[in-house]
Image (spheres, grey):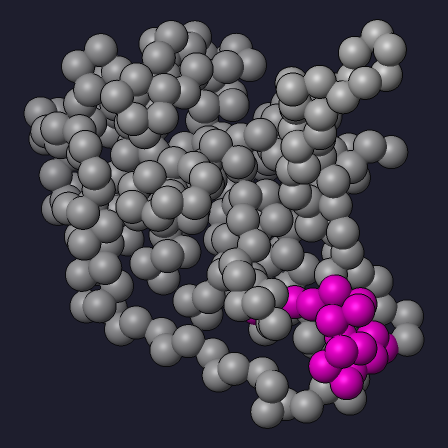
Amino acid sequence: MKIEEIITARIIDKLEQGTIPWHKPWTGGEAPKNLITKKEYRGVNVFILNAMGYSSPYWVSFKQALELGGMVKKGEKGTPVIFWKWMNKTDEEGNLSADHFPFLRYYTVFNIGQLEGLDERKIPAMAVKYNDLEKMAQCETVVMAMPKRPEITYNDQRAYYIPSKDRVNMPKMETFDGSEEYYSTLFHELTHSTGHESRLNRKGIISGIAAFGTQDYSKEELVAEMGAAFLCGHCQIDNKTIDNSAAYIKSWLKKLKDDPKMVILAAAQAQKATDFILCHNEA
């Protein structure tokens, strides 16, 4: 199997179990990260690692586990994480050319819950969780600090983004069941807005919102759902916009089976959208 098929198969397996991997990208206020480098994993890796259900956000390679004096417990299986590596093309004579292209690669990591013999003093304390007021303050900070933020109006009781006017419309906050639902919805629409030509110039937006049911529409919706999930995780709130119904899960099962690369590419674009909104420089 190709790596994109392996990753998508893991997502599909969770969906078939009734779990939506991008519903909640991490728990306890911390994204999954490497124990040694402290670097957070990105894109679809966030959903894959969190879906494994471990309480600790820290992961290591087999070699890193040994370097830390630990050992993978007998019978434990690792989890693949992917990355893009740029490869040079070759000409007809086999010589390297200046042209290059991204190639999907992977390596295997283990959660520290799968290790034994690890010195617990080498494991950082968990991040402090926000209280409810701090969560809402963090949400508002994210919205107000977004660069090139689109106009946000409250003209009717629907949430949507209009690319031609670069405008997000939201129902008023008091019409939502709670603040978390309001910000989850706003994060979804702001993620759509990052596709505008003045921001990330994403195909699903610059060509106009694609027709309902098309591949471009599905991919753009997945980008927005994942982007909202990343932002909700950043603010430590629950993503209240995800439909947990059997019909919703069934629809995504079909789409991902038809296009194994969709979830990887959508997660990568959602990560870029999140980076833009949070003013992060990583791509």
- The picture quadrant where one finds residue 137 is bottom left
User: What residue range appears in magenta?
Assistant: 57-73
Say which residue appears at 19% left-offset and 68% top-offset: 133
**Could you tell me if residue 261 is visible in this image?**
no
Q: Looking at the image, which residue is at 46% across and 70% down? A: 28
Q: Is residue 62 magenta?
A: yes
**Viewer-closest of 206 and 16:** 206
User: Relative to residue 71, is residue 59 drawn left or right?
Assistant: left
Residue found at the far right of this picture? 74
Please identify the quadrant where the C terminus is shown. Answer: top left
Q: Which percent across, then down, holds residue 257? A: 72, 26
So how many labels did they put on this image?
Answer: 0
Q: Which image quarter is the N terminus in? A: top right
Is residue 134 visible in the rendered structure shown here? yes
Residue at image coords 71%, 25%: 88
Residue 200 in the image: state x and y as whole percent.
Answer: 36, 26
Q: Quadrant of residue 118?
A: bottom right
